[in-house]
Image (tube, helix red, strand yellow):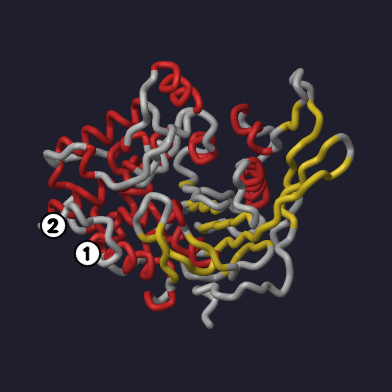
Amino acid sequence: MTAARGRTSRRAAAPPVLVEVTRGDRVESVHRGSIAGVAPDGSLVASAGDPDQFIYLRSSAKPFQLAPFVASGRFDEYQLGTEALAIMAASHSGEDRHVRLVQEILRRAGLTSSALQNQVHAPFDAETAQRLTRDGEQPTVLRGNCSGKHAGMVLFAKASGWPVDTYWHPGHPVQRLALETISALSDVPIEDIATGTDGCGVVCFGMPLRSLALAFARLADPSAVADPHLRSALIRIRDAMMAHPELVAGERRRIDTALMRAYPKRIVSKGGAEGVMAMGLPPGALPSHAPHGAGPMGIAAVIEDGNFARRGGDAISVEILRQIGLASDPLPGWLAEYASPAIVDPRGERAGDVRAAFRLS
């Protein structure tokens, strides 16, 4: 059995505690998981827990699912800008701006939202979701957080002369090229990548945690990627995500947006479902005295319990940046709330904390 396939149901030891949740002066619950920091050459530079823990990449794969479209030159045929790249790599919050942008992308191809096969769900943005409920408006496929990714896949299929209505099938050329790109950037052979169906209905990819970190290291610094078209595509996608963090996630209460706004042009961040987090630090992002090295790196983390409340992942993401030398106290005001979210009582008084509890080796 290969580590990438993750078919074992037994683990030698429980992952370490990454986050403690307190009430009063006692620890009430914990979030366990693993972290891997990897240089673009594949060397492990920082870790906590098991860097080879199996994960599905989920939405952290979106920049790499988009890369073949850009590398092919087909993206430029539609004369779309960097905002389109950002939302095609996004798990957006379903805000009105996101919907309008996806509609414009589809219009460039002479298509409507009926071409999309992603999931329909309430907007991630609470204010938008409440407004829709108040106005009696039902969510549509455009509000789904993956609508930008799916729009990109549809446009890629149409421009390439491939079937549009089956773009989501695992054997479709769009999906096959995404698999090949993930393999090339993670150094995991195609035959060792586990596949499943993602929440939005297209194929998702499974591999060791450190392999996702490696892919993000190469997104952050693609200079050693041999294929010049793929190298250029990664640079464009990385820069678009960093330039438009509010499109990659949303204006309110999204950690990816908060991190990229706090450290502009120094981090590209894209999380995924079930507790997956991934970040890339481009050349020059870290100071020369950084404890784990000053070079570019990719970081991937996973929370064992799936991080449904998101509080654990938020605290871990900020603490990782502290320990590798990018973030320092005092944190930017809007980022501090992610670092240690308060547990509050009905009157808004602090009753406990969510706090990071790990050290990177």
| Horizontal arrangement in the rendering, residue 177 relative to residue 79 (left or right) | right
Q: Which of 225 and 164 is in front in this view?
A: 164
Residue 280 seen in render: yes
| Horizontal arrangement in the rendering, residue 150 relative to residue 330 (left or right) | left
Position in image of residue 233 (x %, y %)? 29, 54
Q: Residues within 10 Å of mark 2 (few under 14, many from 20)?
A: some
Q: Nearer the viewer, residue 281 or 283?
A: 281
Q: Is residue 151 above or below residue 250?
A: below
Amino acid of disc 1: Pro
SS type, badge 1: helix
- Residue at numbered disc 1: 173
Q: Is residue 195 above or below residue 128?
A: below
Picture quadrant where residue 51 is located: bottom right
Position in image of residue 153 (x %, y %)? 25, 51
The reply to whether discs 2 and 1 touch (Cβ–Cβ < 8 Å) is yes
Q: Quadrant of the C terminus?
A: bottom right
Spot the residue most to the right.
25
Position in image of residue 143 (x %, y %)? 36, 34
Q: Which of marks 2 and 1 is nearer the N terminus?
A: 2
Q: In this view, does 49 lie above or below 202?
A: below
Q: Is residue 73 above or below residue 347?
A: below
Residue at x 18%, y 37% (from the top left corner): 112
Position in image of residue 346 (x %, y %)? 75, 21
- Residue at numbered disc 2: 160
